Amino acid sequence: MSFSTSELIKQHALQLFAQKGYYGTSLNDVASLVGIKKPSLYAHFKNKDDLYMTILQELMETFMDRVAIDSLEIQSSSSTKLLLKRLLINMIDFWKDETLGLLYKRTLLFPEEKFRSSIHEHFLETETYTTDILSKIFSKGLDKGEIPPQPLEPLIDAYYCLIDGLFVQRFFYSSSDFDKKAEHAFEHYWKATEIGGK
């Protein structure tokens, strides 16, 4: 499968931005990996900022694609617990991607100051997307009596705290140790959900 020059530029820039960050990456580095001269990059991207923001936009779109659970699947699928676990596993699998996961971590935990506002916008867009999925899953669980009557907002907020904690832990433990922690954390989260809050 052959890639266009534009796609090759993005692929190599993605790897460099993930490994070295925005300031640690030069357009010369990108051009060298692609096998072109730096001025040729400008036929595809206006400048380094344009390339970086294009990659961040695609990173967030890829994240949403990877975690997606559509409405039809939610309605026809088995239990609320399994849907919530599936969403968590989808996120974990994305974080484990050596390049995408690394850039995602770097972007959210250590945002470059000049892009902070844009990164925040992208983050809110992904959160709106995942909140919609969670709302549908929890609403189904409440309707079917799989979880006791309780407000949606605390359920969703607690789920985000669960994934935020696991997101940080992902980068400090081996894959097997992390998977065990994720399993334990999710099971305790689910037990609390089954009890219900006020």
Image (spheres, rainbow, N blue to C red):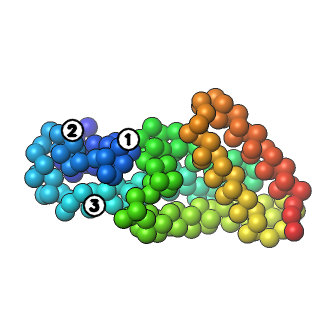
Amino acid type for the residue under numbered disc 1: Gln
The residue at which mark 1 appears reads as: 19
Q: Quadrant of the N terminus?
A: top left
Please tell me whether mark 3 sits on a helix, a strand or a loop: helix
Please tell me whether mark 2 sits on a helix, a strand or a loop: helix
Q: Is residue 4 visible?
A: no
The residue at which mark 3 appears reads as: 49
Q: Residue 75's spot in the image, x, y percent?
A: 69, 59
Amino acid type for the residue under numbered disc 3: Asp
Amino acid type for the residue under numbered disc 2: Leu
Q: Is residue 41 left or right of residue 48?
A: left
At a point 52% along the width and 39% down the height, the residue shown is 96
At a point 74% along the width and 46% down the height, the residue shown is 186
Whole-number angstrom distance, CA of label 2 to CA of label 1:
14 Å
- Marks 3, 2: nearer the viewer: 3
Ranked by sequence position, the earlier of labels 3 and 2 is 2
The numbered disc on residue 33 is: 2
Residues packed near mark 1 inside 10 Å, few (<14), some (14 to 19) or many (20 plus): some
